[in-house]
Structure formats: structure tokens, C-alpha cells
Image: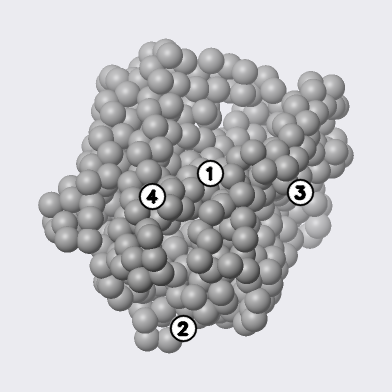
């Protein structure tokens, strides 16, 4: 969920005396490991926020009266803002000062979290989540850039990035448990409010421990590119949402949805297509493009980015629908639901070391293709769940298979994203990988939630003859909707599989020693 830093050779350190320059050389900061603890705390907060909200979502939906069509905005408002502004956030940090950007991101994140925690309406919650994502897009690349600047020794830098990698896996697992505890014993609101004091403490600690640094060169920003890409992606997600919106919201007996042919749905999808096409054309001509196309048009790098986009699309939706299955259909408490997700996180953590050892020996495609086959099979296994199936015979093995498979995807894809990239483009190449995952998660959550809503409507229309039957068959309709969502999640994993098999042809000798830091 975070972007790798800009390369160290593009960095201009700023000394305590205020002198700076490309030739400035500073001894290693004796407090750099304390500073790493501060930066790691911020990284952990970002990782926790992604998983902690999933567990709280059913309670928040009920409390604020959020519709099934709109509930995905709690996730996508954050991921869209985070992924859409990540590249810009990295440039702002490089040009205006990484420490300054990091602290502003922390304080903004604290304020946005407080706003979300006290939200009295769904619109305010969605806005707060978008603000969280925007400030996280400042904080995450700044933190990793600072790590690159502070740790110039390759061994020390590897250890520092190892800390961030461990937090990406372990933090997600911790977030699931913390989210369960806070939702069950306090309120879903504390899943957001807990960030506020933590972010303020981290910001205060960063003032004396973190030194300022910035990159020299052209400091102009691609504002038109930011606007076209952001508005295009929001329009695309909104179009998906409109397709799942109730056709007659005032009539509770009518479960029909607007569908894909509704004028509002088509309008937003067309606007999205126009804006995103204009963005690509603009990026070919911009002097300082937000997304340098030379980065994504390479066969191997492009394959890694597409694979991450498809995996993110399927994976985020899996967490969303399993959360509702656990808490709504099986009656799990939020805490029990959090523990029910642990096999997935622990499986990835356990396999990460094995995959890291295998990658230099067999190359990326030999790991990614079978890994994605396993991920797709694990997702298809979830299409067999029901209100009476056992967790240990259905959910547990499917999560375990998916976690093993996806561990074989994340690490090779992160390394493939840097193949053939010089130091000048290393930061943006890594950032695009993380952006792909976040944008994929946004689009996948919105799309699969729409397909879920349509499947539930179709099931009720085919089986319900009276209001009493609607109440009785409601849980069955939800499970049918989960099945449809999991099936299309497997299809998205299949798209990642085809992408990896057809585009990624890098040899084991091509893989760089240091891969991108990705969630």
C-alpha cells in the first residue's frame, strides 16, 4: 500500500545548517534507527487502516443506513484517492521536502480519521475516507523516500525495507484483530478514531528524529493529468455504483436495480472512457507526465502492473464479501470474523521467505503462473459456501490456497516492475505497481458489488412470491450473490494469469536484487 522511495542519487540532503546541494555528503544519521521506528509506525497505520475498516463495515452500514449499492464507497473512496494521488504525492514529497510532506500527511490523516469517526451521515463518512486516502498518498511515498535517503548502505537499506515488508503482511493481520476488538467492545467509529492520537504522536516524534531532504530538478506538476485520471476513475466507479442502485428506492418490496442500460450508468461510463482516453493522450505530450508511458509500455513491467491490477480487483472484493458472510449469514461477532481471516495473512507471511529464495532460481513467470492458478482455484472454492457449510472445510482451505498462490505473485511482480528501469525511474516504476493494486481494488470492489446486487435481485425475483418468502429467502439470496461475486473474482485472477503467462518473459537473471515495496 505504499510506494517505494525515489532513488537516493536524485536526493539533495538538507543539513542541519540549512546547506544543501548535489555534492553535499553527510555521515549516517546516528538516530536513523529511531527515525525508522517513526516511519514504520506511519506505515503500520496505513496498513492497519485498510484491514481494520473491512471488519467494521457491516456495523457502519447498519448504523448510518448505507445501501448495499453505496457501501463499497467506504472502501473505494479511500483506495481511489490513495491510488489516484500516489504518484503526485511522491513528486510533492521529492520537490517540496519529504519531512514536511510526511508530517503534513500525518496531521491530515489524523484529522480525516477524526472526521470519519464522528460522521453522522454516509456522505460525511465517504468524504472522510477519501481525505484519509489523499493524505496517505502524501505520507506513504514520503516515508519510503526518507528511508532511502537515511540508509545509504545497501545492507542497512535492505533491513529497513524488510521492516516495511514485514509490516505489510503482519499489519494486515493485526488490523483484522484490532478491528474486531474495537467494533465488538467499543464501536465501529473507534476503528477510525484510533488513528488520530497515533498519527499526532508519530508526527511529534518525527520533528526531532527525521531530517529534511528533497530532490533537485524540475518541480512542475502534471495537474491536468491528475484531474483527468482522478475524475475518470471516479466516474468509472460511480457508473458501476449506479448500475447497482435500487430502481425504486421508496418501494421496499421492489428489489430491482437500475442495471447497466440505465441512462445514468451509461453517462458516467462514457464520461470515464473519454477522460481516461484523454489522460493517455495527454501523458504522451506532457513535459512532466504524471505517468511516464515508457514505464508501463515495457512488456514485463506492463505485465506486472496489469497482473497487480487484476489481483487487487479480485482480492479486495473477497475481503468485502467474506466479511458480510461471516457477520450477516453466520452470525460471527466482529472479533471472530477478524480471526477467521487470519489464515490468509499468515499464509502469505509464511510463504514470503520461500518465494524470495525461489525467485532468483526460477524467475518470475514460473512462480506467478502456478500461483495465480492456485489463487483462482481458492476463489472458486468459495462459490461452494452456504449457511450450513463448515468454516474448516470451505473457507479455511480456500484462504490457505489463495494465500500461498498470491505470495507467489506479490514478490515476483514487485521485482518484475523494476526490470530494465534506471535509477531515475525506479521510484515512479515502483509507485505505478502500488497504484495498480489500489486502483484495481477500487474498480474490483465497485464492479463485483454491482454484480452481487444484481444477482441478489435476480434470485429474489425468481423465487419470491410473497413478502414472507422474501424475508425467509433473504439469506439464501445473499449467499447466491456471494457466489456470483466470488466467481467473477476468480475470473479476475484468471485475467491476471493470462497476463502473466503472455506478457512476462523475464529470465531469472533479469530480476533486480531489490524489488518494489508493495502491499
Q: Please name the residue that numbered disc 1 is placed on.
A: 447
Residue located at (64% from left, 38% from top): 261
Q: Does 273 sit above or below residue 281?
A: below
Earlier sequence position, callout 2 versus callout 3: 3
Q: Looking at the image, is mark 1 or mark 4 nearer the viewer?
A: 4
Q: Earlier in the sequence, mark 4 or mark 3?
A: 3
Camera-near label (4 vs 3) is 4
* Residue 370 spot, x, y in % from top left: 27, 26
First in sequence: mark 1 vs mark 4: 1
Residue 427 falls left or right of residue 326 = right
Gap between marks 3 and 1 measured at Cα: 31 Å
Residue at 45%, 75% in the rendered image: 59
Q: Is residue 497 above or below residue 257?
A: above
Residue named by callout 3: 92
Report the Cα–Cα distance between label 1 and label 4.
Answer: 23 Å
Q: Residues within 10 Å of mark 3 (few under 14, many from 20)?
A: many
Secondary structure, mark 1, is: helix
The percent coordinates of residue 274 (x first, y second) are 78, 31
Pick the front one: 178 or 355 = 178
Camera-nearest label, 2 or 1: 1
N-term-proximal mark, 2 vs 4: 2
- Whole-angstrom CA distance, mark 2 to mark 3, is 36 Å
Which label number is shown at residue 187? 2
Instruction: Give the residue number, with chain letter if any, for mark 4.
Output: 462
- Cα–Cα gap, marks 2 and 1: 29 Å
- Mark 3 or 1: the one toward you: 1
Residues 66 and 189: in front is 66
> Quick check: can you spot residue 316?
no
Q: CA distance from mark 4 to mark 3?
A: 54 Å
Give the x, y percent position of residue 464.
Answer: 37, 58
Amino acid at each position: 500500500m505504499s510506494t517505494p522511495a525515489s532513488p537516493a542519487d536524485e536526493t539533495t540532503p538538507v543539513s542541519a545548517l540549512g546547506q544543501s546541494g548535489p555534492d553535499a555528503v553527510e555521515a549516517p544519521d546516528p538516530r536513523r534507527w529511531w527515525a525508522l521506528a517513526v516511519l514504520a509506525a506511519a506505515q503500520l497505520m496505513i496498513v492497519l487502516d485498510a484491514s481494520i475498516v473491512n471488519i467494521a463495515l457491516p456495523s457502519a452500514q447498519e448504523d448510518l443506513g448505507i445501501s448495499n449499492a453505496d457501501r463499497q464507497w467506504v472502501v473505494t473512496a479511500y483506495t481511489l484517492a490513495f491510488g489516484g494521488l500516489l504518484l503526485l504525492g511522491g513528486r510533492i514529497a521529492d520537490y517540496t521536502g519529504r519531512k514536511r510532506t510526511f508530517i503534513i500527511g500525518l496531521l491530515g490523516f489524523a484529522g480525516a480519521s477524526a472526521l470519519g469517526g464522528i460522521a453522522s451521515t454516509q456522505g460525511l463518512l465517504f468524504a472522510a475516507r477519501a481525505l484519509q486516502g489523499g493524505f496517505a498518498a502524501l505520507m506513504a511515498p514520503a516515508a519510503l523516500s526518507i528511508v532511502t535517503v537515511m540508509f545509504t548502505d545497501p545492507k542497512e537499506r535492505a533491513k529497513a525495507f524488510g521492516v516495511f515488508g514485514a509490516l505489510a503482511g503482519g499489519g494486515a493481520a493485526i488490523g483484522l484483530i484490532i478491528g474486531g476488538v474495537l467494533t465488538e467492545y467499543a464501536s465501529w467509529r473507534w476503528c477510525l478514531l484510533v488513528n488520530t492520537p497515533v498519527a499526532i504522536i508519530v508526527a511529534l516524534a518525527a520533528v526531532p528524529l527525521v531530517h529534511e531532504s528533497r530532490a533537485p530538478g524540475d518541480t512542475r506538476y502534471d495537474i491536468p493529468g491528475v484531474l483527468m485520471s482522478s475524475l475518470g476513475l471516479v466516474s468509472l466507479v460511480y457508473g458501476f455504483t449506479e448500475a447497482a442502485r435500487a430502481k425504486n428506492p421508496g418501494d421496499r418490496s421492489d428489489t430491482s436495480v437500475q442495471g447497466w442500460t440505465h441512462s445514468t450508468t451509461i453517462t458516467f461510463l462514457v464520461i470515464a472512457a473519454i477522460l481516461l482516453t484523454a489522460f493517455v493522450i495527454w501523458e504522451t505530450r506532457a513535459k512532466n507526465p504524471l505517468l511516464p508511458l515508457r514505464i508501463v509500455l515495457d512488456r514485463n513491467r506492463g505485465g506486472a502492473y496489469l497482473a497487480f491490477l487484476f489481483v487487487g480487483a479480485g482480492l479486495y472484493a473477497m475481503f468485502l464479501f467474506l466479511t458480510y458472510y461471516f457477520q450477516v449469514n453466520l452470525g460471527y461477532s466482529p472479533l471472530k470474523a477478524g480471526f477467521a481471516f487470519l489464515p490468509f495473512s499468515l499464509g502469505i507471511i509464511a510463504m514470503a521467505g520461500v518465494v524470495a529464495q525461489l525467485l532468483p532460481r526460477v524467475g518470475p513467470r514460473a512462480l506467478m503462473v502456478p500461483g495465480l492458478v492456485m489463487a483462482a482455484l481458492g476463489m472458486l472454492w468459495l462459490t461452494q459456501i452456504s449457511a450450513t457449510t463448515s468454516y474448516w472445510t470451505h473457507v479455511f482451505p480456500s484462504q490457505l490456497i489463495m494465500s500461498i498462490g498470491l505470495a507467489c505473485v506479490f514478490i515476483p511482480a514487485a521485482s518484475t516492475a523494476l526490470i530494465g528501469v534506471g535509477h531515475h525511474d525506479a521510484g515512479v516504476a515502483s509507485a505505478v505497481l502500488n497504484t495498480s493494486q489500489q486502483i484495481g481494488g477500487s474498480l474490483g470492489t465497485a464492479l463485483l458489488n454491482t454484480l452481487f446486487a444484481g444477482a441478489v435481485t435476480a434470485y429474489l425475483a425468481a423465487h419470491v412470491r410473497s413478502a414472507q418468502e422474501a424475508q425467509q429467502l433473504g439469506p439464501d439470496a445473499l449467499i447466491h450473490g456471494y457466489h456470483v461475486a466470488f466467481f467473477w473474482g476468480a475470473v479476475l485472477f484468471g485475467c491476471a494469469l493470462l497476463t502473466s503467462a503472455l506478457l512476462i518473459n523475464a529470465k531469472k537473471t533479469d530480476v533486480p536484487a531489490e524489488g518494489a515495496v508493495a502491499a
